[in-house]
Amino acid sequence: MIEETVRGMGYDLVELERSAGGLLRVTLDFPWVQGQPEQPITVEDCERVTRQLQYTLEVENADYKRLEVASPGIDRPLNGSNDCLRFAGSVVDLTLKQALGEAAAGSGLAANRKKFRGTLETVEESVDNHLWRIVWSDEPPPKPGVRVSKKKAPAPLQAMTFSLDEVREIRLAPIVNFKGRANPSAMPTTTETDPKE
């Protein structure tokens, strides 16, 4: 019902959460069309969807204490091939459904590893974007204020190809650049209401 309402208003439902305390959190974004400029979710968009959802939830007699409508923010979940294509080239946090197991044998990876942080890439030879690749380095980032020698060889890059069926969750890595934001649309926008008001 919530997804139909949000889509009917011209938005995509990114995430829907319901907490034990009665909080209903709806995360939305504009549909992405390749080649067209990104449009950020504004407070006005959140307010508009909040008003419509309050009406819809009241008509449907839904049980909730508070409604929160928000933009995806900097740790946005990626749902499906379209989102992966949209954010290809970005740093993501990837969690597999199952540990690597035997697939890790001889690769230098721990067999019980499920979590990775790296750059998301498309696999060109994949038909209909069924395969993706994550590329990373296990070298820890340098500590702030510590100089890194230019003579030091960088750690080798590692890569893993996966399908979305193997993935529990992919999210944009919440990396903040304090020298200037590369993507202003990643700033979270939120409205919150209490149904008693």
Image (cartoon, rainbow, N blue to C red):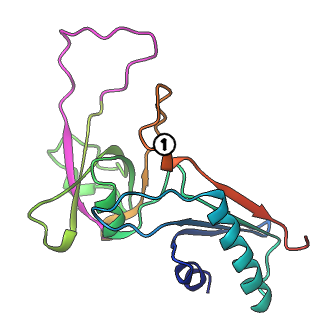
Q: Is residue 102 left or right of residue 172?
A: left
67 inside magenta stretch = no
Q: Which residue is mark 1?
A: 174
- Which stretch appears magenta? 139-164
Placement of the C terminus among the 4 image quadrants? bottom right
Residue in the picture at 54% in, 51% down: 73
Residue 74 appears in the rendering: no
22 displayed left or right of 33: right
List x then y, in percent, for residue 114.
Answer: 37, 52
Image quarter of residue 123: bottom left
Image position of 64 (left or right of 90):
right
**How many numbered circles are shown?**
1
Q: Is residue 12 visible?
A: yes
Identify the secondary structure beneath mark 1: loop
Mainly helix, strand or loop, the magenta region? Answer: loop
Q: Quadrant of residue 98?
A: bottom left
Residue 134: x %, y % from top left: 26, 50
Horizontal and vertical percent position of residue 184: 49, 44
- Residue 110 coordinates in the image, percent (x, y): 29, 44
55 vs 173: above or below: below
Q: Residue furthest bottom?
A: 60
Using the image as rendered, state which of residue 32 and residue 90 is in the foreground: 32
Q: Amino acid at mark 1?
A: Pro
Is residue 182 found left or right of 164 in the rendered image? right
Image quadrant occupied by the N terminus = bottom right
Above/below status of 140 relative to 162: above
Q: Residue at x 13, y 67 (%)?
A: 126
